[in-house]
Image (tube, rainbow, N blue to C red):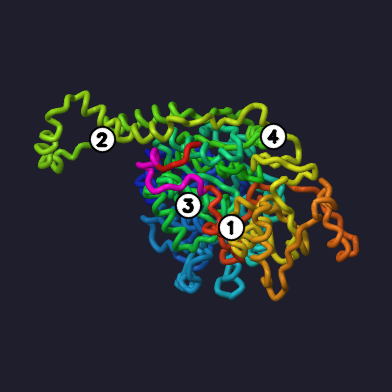
C-alpha cells in the first residue's frame, strides 16, 4: 500500500502521484499533510527547497476544495514566474484523475487577456505572482470572497523582493475566516511578522533547525586572486566533467558577461536573468531541463522556483549579499534526497562572510584547493575512458559500417587503438594545461587591510579608493528609482564601457558616486554629454579632485556649496565589483527594467575562443 493512502490522501490522487514516482512521503509531507487535511489550522512550515513543499500543501488542497463549484477557493502566492508555472503544472499532474479541476497560473510576462479568459471560464485554484495578481484585482476581474485557503510559498523570498505591500493589498480582498498556510525555507524576522499579522495561533512545523541548509549538500570554498577568478572557475568546471550546475552571480550584467565568455570558450552555457522576455526564459529553461545546457548562469531572483532534477553543483561565482540567499542557492542541488555540492569562489576579504554563513547554517565548509593542470587532465582522461566503457552500442545500426571500420584499424593493435581514442580528448587538455599555474591565492594575500578592494586585485590610495580609478559624481540617485545595479546598467549602456571598468557605486538620495578606470573617465564624460533623464540634464563631474575627500567618503567642496553644506556623506559601503546591486530591478512582473549591457562589457573577454576542441591552440595561458 502506498504510504500516502495512510496519510489520508484518496486513491485517485495517490494513483496519479505514484505514476510521477512518489513512493514515500518526504519528512515535510509526512508531518504536514495530516495537519492540513483537517482544514482547521493556520500553518507555518519551515523546510529547505527541494524537500517537497508543493505536494505538502497541494495534495491537501485537492482533498479539501469543492470542485463542483467554479469559483476561486484557494490562492497560492509565490515570488517568481518559474515557480508559479511549476506549482501549476504539479497540481494539474496530481489531479489528472479528478474531474473539473481548474488551476490557473497568473504571472507577468505572459498575455493578461489569456489569463483573464481562463479566470472567466471558472477556476478553483489560482497560482500567482503578487504583481500580476494585484493588476487583475485592480481591474475587478476576480472575486476572492469565496477563498477558503491562502498559501504563501517561498514567503521569505517574496518579502526579499519587496512584495510586502502587494501581499497586504491582495490579502485584504480575501475573507477573514480563511486559513493561511505559509511555507518558507528560512524564518527571518520579516516572515515572523507576516505570520503574526495574518495568522491566528498557527501550527508551526520546522524540519531541521531554522535557517539551516540541506544535510545532503557538501559546502566547499576556494580562495583565489580576483584576476584569477574566471580561470579558476573554468578549472573547477573542467575538473568535474559530468557537472550539471547552476552558477550564481550578483548582477544581470555579470551573469550575461560570464555566460557569453563561457559560450565563446566552448562550454554549453546560457544566462537567466530578469531582462529576458518570458519566451527567452522558457527557451533557456527548456534547454537546461533537456540537458543541452551544462551550466545555467543566473541571478538570485531569476533562479527562484527552478525545479530541475539532478543538479550536481551550485557555484557561487559571487557570494550573495544576504545570508538567506545562500540557503536558497544551495537548495537548488541535493533535491528529493539526493546529494550535491555547493561551491563558493571567493577572495581573501570574503573569508569572514564564509564564517557567517557557516555559523548560520551550523555547518563547517571545506576549504578546497584549485586543482592543478595535471589533476584536470587526469580527471578528464578517465572520464572519457569511463564514457567509452559504458557507451550503449546500437548493434543494428552500426553493423553495416563495421567492415570499413575494421579495415581502417586492421594495421593497429588493440593497445594502439585504445591509445588513439584516449588521445582524441587527452591531447587538447594536455596542451591547454601543460603550463597551468597555481591559481590558489597565496596565504599572504588574504585578507588585506580594510578599505582595500581586493576583489579587483589592485592597489589603493590613502583615501581608500583604487589608485587606478577615478570617483565621479552623477546627479541621479534613489529618488530617481536607481539601485546600484540599475545605475551600473545605466552607466554601461549610456557610455558603452565594460561592467568590469566600473568600481564601487554609492547611491544617495538625489545624487550618486561611482568609480571608473582612469582610462575611461573621458569616455564616460563624453558618453553622458547632452544626455537627459526624464527631462533633466544628466551631469557628470569628477568628485573631490583627489584632495577634498577622506576615507569617510565626503563629497567635493563644489557640491557641498550647492547643497548648502547640509549633507554628510556616509562611509564607503562594501559593494560587489560590479556595483553590488543584489536586487533585480526588472523582475517584478513588468516593472522597470535595466538593460543587461552584456554586449557593451566583456569583462572576461581574455578567455574567448572558437571551439572547446581547439582550446589548446587558441586560449591564453593562465
Does dot 1 land on a helix, a strand or a loop?
A: strand
Residue drawn where x is 90% and y is 64% of the image: 564
Task: Please report the bounds of the magenta region as a residue range.
Answer: 605-617
Residue wearing tag 1: 150
Residue wearing tag 2: 391
Numbered disc in front, either 3 or 1: 3
Residue drawn where x is 44% and y is 58% of the image: 282
- Sequence-wise, the earlier of marks 2 and 4 is 4
- Sequence-wise, the earlier of marks 1 and 2 is 1
Compute the Cα span from label 2 to label 4: 46 Å
Rendering coords of residue 316 (x, y %): 56, 41
Compute the Cα span from label 3 to label 1: 41 Å
- Sequence-wise, the earlier of marks 2 and 3 is 3
Numbered label attached to residue 352: 4
Would you say residue 64 is visible in this rendering?
A: no
Residue 526 image-quadrant placement:
bottom right
- Sequence-wise, the earlier of marks 4 and 3 is 3
Numbered label attached to residue 260: 3
Numbered disc in front, either 1 or 2: 2
Does 191 appear in magenta?
Answer: no
- Sequence-wise, the earlier of marks 3 and 1 is 1
In contact (CB < 8 Å): disc 4 and disc 3: no
Does dot 2 land on a helix, a strand or a loop?
A: loop
Compute the Cα span from label 1 to label 2: 50 Å
The crowding category of the residue bearing disc 1, from other C-alpha atoms within 10 Å (few below 14, some 14 to 19, many at least 20), is: many
Residue drawn where x is 64% and y is 33% of the image: 358
Q: Nearer the viewer, residue 286 or 539?
A: 539
Residue drawn where x is 42% and y is 47% of the image: 609
Compute the Cα span from label 4 to label 1: 40 Å
Amino acid at each position: 500500500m502506498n504510504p500516502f493512502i495512510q496519510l489520508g490522501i484518496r486513491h485517485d490522487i495517490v494513483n496519479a502521484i505514484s505514476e510521477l514516482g512518489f513512493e514515500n512521503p518526504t519528512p515535510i509531507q509526512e508531518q504536514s499533510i495530516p495537519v492540513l487535511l483537517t482544514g482547521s489550522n493556520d500553518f507555518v512550515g519551515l523546510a529547505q527547497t527541494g524537500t517537497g513543499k508543493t505536494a505538502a500543501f497541494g495534495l491537501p488542497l485537492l482533498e479539501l476544495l469543492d470542485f463542483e463549484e467554479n469559483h476561486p477557493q484557494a490562492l497560492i502566492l509565490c515570488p517568481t514566474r518559474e515557480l508559479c508555472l511549476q506549482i501549476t503544472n504539479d497540481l494539474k499532474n496530481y489531479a489528472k484523475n479528478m474531474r473539473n479541476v481548474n488551476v490557473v497560473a497568473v504571472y507577468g510576462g505572459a498575455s493578461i487577456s489569456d489569463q483573464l479568459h481562463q479566470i472567466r471560464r471558472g477556476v478553483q485554484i489560482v497560482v500567482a505572482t503578487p504583481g500580476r495578481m494585484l493588476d487583475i484585482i485592480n481591474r475587478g476581474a476576480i472575486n476572492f470572497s469565496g477563498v477558503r485557503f491562502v498559501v504563501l510559498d517561498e514567503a521569505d523570498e517574496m518579502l526579499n523582493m519587496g512584495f510586502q505591500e502587494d501581499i497586504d493589498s491582495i490579502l485584504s480582498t480575501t475573507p477573514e475566516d480563511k486559513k493561511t498556510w505559509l511555507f518558507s525555507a528560512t524564518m527571518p524576522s520579516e516572515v515572523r511578522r507576516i505570520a503574526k499579522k495574518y495568522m491566528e495561533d498557527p501550527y508551526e512545523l520546522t524540519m531541521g533547525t531554522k535557517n539551516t541548509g540541506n544535510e545532503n549538500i557538501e559546502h566547499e570554498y576556494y580562495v583565489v586572486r580576483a584576476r584569477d577568478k574566471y580561470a579558476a572557475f573554468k578549472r573547477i568546471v573542467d575538473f568535474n566533467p559530468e557537472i550539471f550546475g547552476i552558477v550564481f552571480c550578483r548582477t544581470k550584467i555579470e551573469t550575461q558577461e560570464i555566460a557569453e565568455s563561457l559560450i565563446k570558450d566552448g562550454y554549453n552555457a546560457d544566462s537567466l536573468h530578469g531582462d529576458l522576455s518570458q519566451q527567452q526564459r522558457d527557451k533557456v529553461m527548456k534547454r537546461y531541463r533537456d540537458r543541452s545546457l551544462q551550466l545555467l548562469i543566473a541571478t538570485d531572483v531569476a533562479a527562484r522556483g527552478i525545479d530541475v532534477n539532478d543538479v550536481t553543483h551550485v557555484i557561487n561565482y559571487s557570494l550573495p549579499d544576504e545570508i538567506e540567499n545562500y540557503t536558497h542557492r544551495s537548495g537548488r542541488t541535493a533535491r528529493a534526497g539526493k546529494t550535491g555540492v555547493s561551491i563558493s569562489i571567493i577572495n581573501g576579504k570574503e573569508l569572514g562572510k564564509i564564517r557567517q554563513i557557516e555559523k548560520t547554517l551550523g555547518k563547517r565548509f571545506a576549504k578546497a584547493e584549485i586543482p592543478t593542470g595535471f589533476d584536470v587532465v587526469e580527471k578528464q582522461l578517465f572520464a572519457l575512458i569511463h564514457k567509452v566503457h559504458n557507451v550503449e552500442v546500437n548493434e543494428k545500426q552500426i553493423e553495416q559500417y563495421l567492415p570499413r571500420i575494421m579495415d581502417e584499424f586492421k594495421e593497429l593493435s588493440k593497445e594502439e587503438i585504445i591509445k588513439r581514442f584516449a588521445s582524441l580528448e587527452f591531447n587538447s587538455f594536455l596542451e591547454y594545461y601543460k603550463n597551468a599555474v597555481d591559481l590558489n591565492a597565496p596565504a599572504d594575500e588574504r585578507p588585506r587591510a580594510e578599505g582595500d578592494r581586493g576583489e579587483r586585485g589592485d592597489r589603493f590610495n590613502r583615501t581608500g579608493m583604487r589608485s587606478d580609478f577615478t570617483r565621479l559624481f552623477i546627479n541621479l540617485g534613489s529618488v530617481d528609482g536607481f539601485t546600484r545595479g540599475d545605475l551600473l546598467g545605466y552607466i554601461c549602456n549610456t557610455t558603452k564601457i565594460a561592467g568590469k571598468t566600473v568600481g564601487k557605486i554609492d547611491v544617495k538620495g538625489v545624487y550618486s558616486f561611482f568609480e571608473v578606470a582612469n582610462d575611461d573617465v573621458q569616455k564616460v564624460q563624453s558618453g553622458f554629454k547632452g544626455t537627459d533623464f526624464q527631462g533633466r540634464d544628466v551631469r557628470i563631474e569628477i568628485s573631490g579632485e583627489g584632495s577634498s575627500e577622506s576615507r569617510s567618503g565626503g563629497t567635493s567642496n563644489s557640491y557641498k556649496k550647492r547643497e548648502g553644506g547640509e549633507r554628510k556623506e556616509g562611509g564607503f559601503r562594501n559593494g560587489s565589483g560590479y556595483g553590488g546591486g543584489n536586487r533585480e530591478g526588472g523582475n517584478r512582473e513588468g516593472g522597470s527594467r535595466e538593460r543587461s549591457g552584456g554586449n557593451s562589457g566583456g569583462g572576461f573577454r581574455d578567455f574567448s575562443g572558437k571551439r572547446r576542441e581547439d582550446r589548446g591552440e587558441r586560449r591564453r595561458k593562465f
